[in-house]
């Protein structure tokens, strides 16, 4: 599934594809904020900030039963889904074994403390 590709291995988006989202400081450390996509069948996007200030963007929908990942607990490079505690890698969106599946991920760029996301992916 496309969403399971680690983003460190995908090509960068063209400049016109980057959508400004918020400031890094607008995202709670070890937390998330939601980027709403009304009318988009893919649902909302969760923008996560790790403990060391890296930023990740994933569909706000757990690959298990659609739980809101933005309300999960961020630990290291993972988020624990609030519904049944599956752990999802923030970089690839992949569920940690033995669970299977992935949440779609989106390339993120941080520039001068501002967060940009390529919402159409790569
Ligand atoms: S919906 Fe996320 S673990 Fe079940």
Image (cartoon, rainbow, N blue to C red):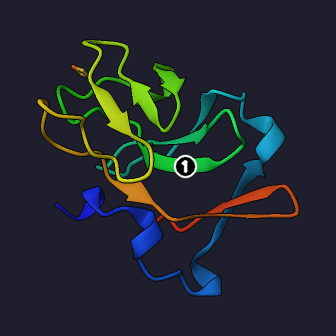
Write down the residue under mark 1. Answer: 56
Q: Secondary structure at mark 1?
A: strand
**Horizontal and vertical percent position of residue 72:** 45, 20
**35 relative to 65 in the view: left or right:** right
Image coordinates for residue 73, horizontal then vertical, percent: 49, 19
Would residue 35 be seen by someone viewing this image from the given angle? no
Kindly tell me whether mark 1's CB lies below 8 Å from ligand 1. no
Q: Is residue 29 above or below residue 10?
A: above
Picture mark count: 1
User: Who is closer to the viewer here, 41 or 58?
Assistant: 58
Q: Is residue 32 above or below residue 116?
A: above
Camera-side residue: 38 or 64? 64
| Ligand 1 occupies quarter | top left
- Rendering quarter of residue 30: top right
Identify the residue at horizontal 37%, vertical 14% (top origin). Answer: 82
Q: Residues within 10 Å of mark 1 (few under 14, many from 20)?
A: many
Which residue is at a point 39% across and 55% down the rendered structure image?
105
Q: Quadrant location of residue 68?
A: top left
Quadrant where the C terminus lies?
bottom left
Where residue 31 sits, quadrant-wise, is top right
Residue farthest along the right direction in this orientation: 112
Q: Position of residue 40 (x, y in %)?
A: 36, 52
Left or right: 112 in relation to 22 = right
Q: Quadrant of the N terminus?
A: bottom left
Looking at the picture, tell me which residue is in the foreground, 38 or 90: 90
Residue 29: x percent and y percent? 71, 29
Q: Is 56 left, or right, of 86 in this rendering?
A: right
Q: Residue at x 24, y 35 (%)?
A: 96
Give the residue at x 51% y 50%: 57
Q: Which of 118/112 is in front?
A: 112
Q: Is residue 40 visible?
A: yes
């Amino acid at each position: 599934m496309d969403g399971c590709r680690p983003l460190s291995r995908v090509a960068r988006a063209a400049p016109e594809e980057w959508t400004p989202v918020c400031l890094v400081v607008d995202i709670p450390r070890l937390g998330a904020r939601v980027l709403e996509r009304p009318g988009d069948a893919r649902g909302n996007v969760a923008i996560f900030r790790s403990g060391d200030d890296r930023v990740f963007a994933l569909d706000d929908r757990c690959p298990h039963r659609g739980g809101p990942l933005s309300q999960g607990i961020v630990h290291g490079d993972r988020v624990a889904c609030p519904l049944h505690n599956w752990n999802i890698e923030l970089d690839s969106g992949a569920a940690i074994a033995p669970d299977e599946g992935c949440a779609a991920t989106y390339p993120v760029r941080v520039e001068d403390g501002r967060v940009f996301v390529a919402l159409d992916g790569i």
